[in-house]
């Protein structure tokens, strides 16, 4: 970018934009939205190849030149933050480089981004431009002499001033900004706010006017009341004195007192008409300015270069101002052009000419690169890790690392057993962080010998199996047939519960999430939840536990018929229902841990 053209007058629209920054919170937030992102981005010197690819440079000379660009605080945060605000508000700013004071050994050169109000060209001294800097209104201007291009070294008391601006499509030297097209909406917001405040402060808009008879007075009867001077009437004087504090003390009791006026005494002495309260403002009336201000704010949000929901402070996804600073890919589409403009300005104003002056061979390819990873990365990575763990996509070690926990922070065997019991109401044994099956509950597996081939039939035809001797298989581990029936009923009950939940979930999503219904079209009911996944179910679905209640009733009836008491059968049913919900996103879940042992014990197994 070229040096400043030395404009001595700031355009009125830029003054208005800066004034609205101080008056309207939405303008301040919108200006700071991009500024915060620019301040967090990592910037670095880079080389652009023939294909336009930008690669970070580790050349010591180029890195040293880039490291010179530091604001008075020792970094670049303040500089780039200020650039983001001014680019949004006025579309124009100055890059100010000030040489170090040679008399001060500890002094360093400084780099700053300042507004057009702070720097004003006052003419020339010889062939060098003379500038006045006003750091704040009312302060004595600081006189600065611009250095020649060949003197761009940290010595002397000169400055370099470069103008950075968004080019207006009409004229290349005229600045443009997102605020320029929404100034009328900002004025409407300010006027509506002033009107609302005036209504709230005005006593006429509140209590109204109290009309009292002239005969109500604490003055001597022979004294003449001066209508122009209410202080002559002690009664009215005291009331008036209390009421005039409404504006000065809006929280006092006097602020809600009505205005008192004198009216003629009622004819006929009707005591019921001695006084009346005249309401100027209807308390049920809606303040129209509130609606006008809201609509103006919406038009402002649509008109500026950032997502409207960010300006309004609340999006359809529940994003509020406290978490609206997070930048997603869509938001980055608005910020990236501003970041690229800042990089191009810095490279063309300083880094590329400095590299050429320093003898850098490939100075024409020098540019400024940036890495937005710190802006786009969600800092709440643990929440994402927890969702992945619930979806069985990652392990416990990954989850602990996301939560900054070490392996020694894992649950002890006793704590894990207690947690599993609370979740499933089923006692289990835990050893080394893993669930173990007690020896008594383990089925005994009988080794199977070689399979004997059937003898050929006399007629040479394939055997039909009609004459093959058959025996019922012996239950493994000494389990009775009742135990086998209960295990089969439990498996069937789990599938029945999964089908019930899936069917009700599909009906619940109909009309609420057409995309979700289309996703599970043709999927059997038992796999609906597993197909959708926990994120969609938790976002749109009902309480899954309520859908699974009484889903295991058939198992209870089978267990009772097999001699299990009603209480014990109900307990097993609850275990099945809770276990089915906890594994609803698994496609092929197993029976609850320890369920086999309880069935063996309850069914009278040896």
Image (cartoon, rainbow, N blue to C red):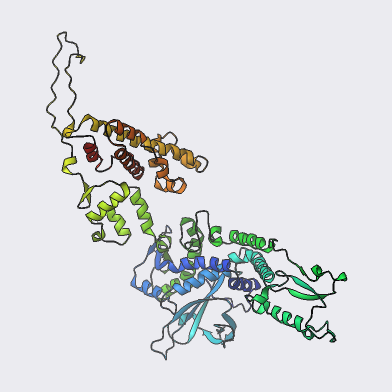
Identify the residue at image location x=56%, y=58%.
308
Q: Position of residue 412 (x, y in %)?
A: 23, 56
| Residue 341 seen by the camera | no
Whether 566 is drawn above or below 240: the answer is above
Q: Does residue 426 appear to the left or right of 366 in the view shown? A: left
On the image, the x and y values in percent for residue 339 come to 48, 65
In this rendering, the answer to whether 477 lies above or below 425 is above
How many numbered badges does the structure rendering display?
Answer: 0
Residue 477 versus residue 252 in the image, above or below: above
Towards the viewer: 431 or 255: 255
The correct choice, above or below, for 533 with respect to 381 in the image is above
The residue closer to the viewer here, 235 or 395, is 235
Residue occupying the point 70% across, 72% down: 202
Does 83 sit left or right of 385 as displayed? right
Name which residue lies at 27% across and 35% down.
564
Residue farthest to the top, as pictured: 459
- Tell me residue 179's x, y (percent): 60, 66
At a point 42% along the width and 91% down the height, the residue shown is: 103
């Amino acid at each position: 970018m070229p040096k400043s053209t030395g404009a001595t007058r700031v355009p009125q629209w830029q003054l208005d934009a800066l004034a609205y920054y101080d008056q309207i919170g939405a303008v301040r937030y919108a200006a700071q939205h991009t500024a915060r992102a620019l301040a967090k981005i990592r910037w670095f010197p880079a080389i652009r190849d023939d294909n336009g690819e930008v690669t970070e440079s580790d050349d010591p000379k180029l890195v040293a030149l880039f490291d010179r660009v530091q604001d008075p605080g020792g970094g670049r945060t303040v500089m780039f933050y200020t650039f983001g605000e001014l680019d949004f508000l006025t579309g124009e700013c100055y890059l100010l480089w000030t040489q170090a004071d040679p008399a001060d050994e500890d002094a360093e050169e400084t780099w700053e981004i300042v507004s057009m109000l702070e720097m004003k060209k006052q003419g020339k001294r010889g062939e060098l431009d003379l500038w006045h800097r006003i750091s704040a209104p009312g302060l004595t201007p600081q006189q600065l002499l611009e250095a020649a291009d060949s003197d761009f070294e940290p010595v002397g008391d000169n400055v370099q001033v470069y103008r950075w601006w968004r080019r207006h499509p009409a004229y290349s030297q005229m600045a443009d900004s997102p605020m320029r097209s929404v100034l009328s909406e900002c004025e409407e917001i300010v006027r509506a706010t002033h009107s609302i405040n005036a209504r709230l402060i005005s006593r006429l808009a509140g209590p109204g006017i109290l009309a009292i008879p002239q005969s109500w007075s604490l003055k001597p009867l022979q004294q003449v009341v001066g209508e122009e001077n209410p202080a002559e009437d002690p009664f009215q004087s005291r009331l008036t004195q209390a009421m005039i504090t409404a504006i000065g003390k809006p929280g006092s009791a006097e602020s809600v007192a009505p205005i008192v006026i004198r009216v003629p005494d009622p004819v006929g002495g009707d005591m019921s008409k001695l006084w009346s309260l005249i309401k100027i403002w209807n308390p049920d009336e809606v303040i129209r300015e509130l609606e006008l201000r809201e609509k103006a704010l919406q038009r402002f949000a649509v008109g500026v270069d950032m997502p409207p929901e960010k300006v309004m402070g609340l999006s359809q996804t529940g994003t509020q101002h406290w978490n609206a600073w997070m930048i997603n890919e869509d938001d980055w589409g608005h910020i990236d052009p501003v970041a690229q403009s800042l990089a191009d300005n810095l490279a063309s104003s300083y880094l590329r000419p400095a590299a050429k002056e320093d003898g850098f061979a490939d100075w024409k390819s020098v540019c400024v690169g940036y890495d937005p990873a710190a802006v786009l990365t969600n800092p709440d990575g643990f929440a994402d890790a927890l969702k992945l763990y619930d979806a069985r996509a990652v392990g416990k070690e990954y989850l602990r690392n996301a939560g900054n926990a070490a392996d020694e922070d894992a649950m002890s065997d006793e704590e894990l057993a207690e947690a599993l019991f609370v979740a499933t109401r089923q006692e289990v044994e835990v050893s080394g962080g893993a669930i173990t099956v007690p020896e008594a509950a383990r089925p005994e597996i009988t080794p199977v010998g070689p399979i004997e081939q059937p003898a050929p039939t006399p007629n040479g035809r394939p055997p039909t199996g009609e004459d093959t001797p058959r025996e019922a298989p012996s239950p493994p581990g000494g389990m009775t047939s009742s135990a086998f029936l209960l295990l089969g009923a439990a498996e069937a009950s789990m599938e029945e519960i999964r089908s019930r939940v899936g069917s009700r979930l599909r009906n619940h999503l109909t009309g609420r999430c057409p995309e979700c219904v289309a996703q599970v079209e043709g999927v059997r009911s038992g796999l609906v939840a597993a197909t959708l996944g926990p994120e969609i179910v938790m976002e749109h679905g009902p309480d899954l536990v309520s859908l699974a209640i009484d889903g295991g009733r058939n198992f209870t009836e089978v267990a009772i018929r097999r001699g299990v008491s009603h209480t014990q059968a109900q307990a097993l049913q609850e275990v099945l229902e809770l276990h089915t919900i906890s594994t609803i996103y698994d496609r092929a879940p197993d029976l609850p841990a320890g369920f086999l042992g309880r069935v063996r014990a309850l069914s009278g197994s040896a």
